[in-house]
Amino acid sequence: MNHIVQEQCDDTCEGTHPLSELKRNLIGESTAAGLADIFKALGDPTRVKIIHTLLQQELCVHDITQVLDMGQSAVSHQLRYLRNLRIVKRRKEGKTVYYSLDDEHIEQIFVQMLQHMKHA
């Protein structure tokens, strides 16, 4: 999408911006806050590593701690945070709890951002 942004717009602006339509279509407060929370979660390197690991395959907490070389308490705390935001989900099999990404939307966002980072 190409957007033309006017550098300065003051009270004397004579542009023909469809402001009323933009206002009407503005994202709601709760949606904006929820989206900001997801991006905030992606702002932590440990959580990014967990997401990247789970992008590759479903794992139990113990396996995640081994991959990231972190303590179980720290990993569990981060997984709980990610689960509360519906970024990861869990599946219980006997006494073992397995974690995976919640859905393909999370995977798509993450993969897109990785591609963006690699883009020169």
Image (tube, helix red, strand yellow):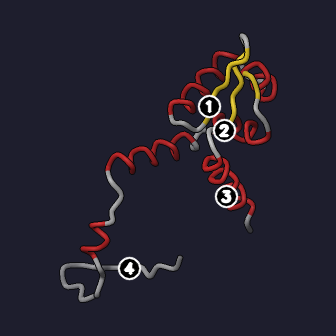
- Going by the picture, which residue comes out furthest to the top? 95
Task: Using the image as rendered, state which of residue 102 and residue 11 is in the foreground.
Answer: 102
Q: Which residue is tagged 4?
A: 7
- Upstream in the sequence, badge 2 or badge 1? 1
Camera-near label (4 vs 1) is: 1
Gap in angstroms between the C-alphas marked 4 and 2: 40 Å
Task: Using the image as rendered, state which of residue 56 and residue 77 is in the foreground.
Answer: 56
Pinpoint residue 66: horizontal percent, then vertical percent: 81, 23
- Upstream in the sequence, badge 4 or badge 2? 4
CB atoms of marks 2 and 1 within 8 Å = yes
Q: Which residue is tagged 1?
A: 89
Q: Which residue is tagged 2?
A: 101
Task: Look at the picture and state if 101 lies above or below 80.
Answer: below
Camera-near label (4 vs 3) is: 3
Mark 4 residue type: Glu
Camera-near label (3 vs 1) is: 1
- Upstream in the sequence, badge 4 or badge 1? 4
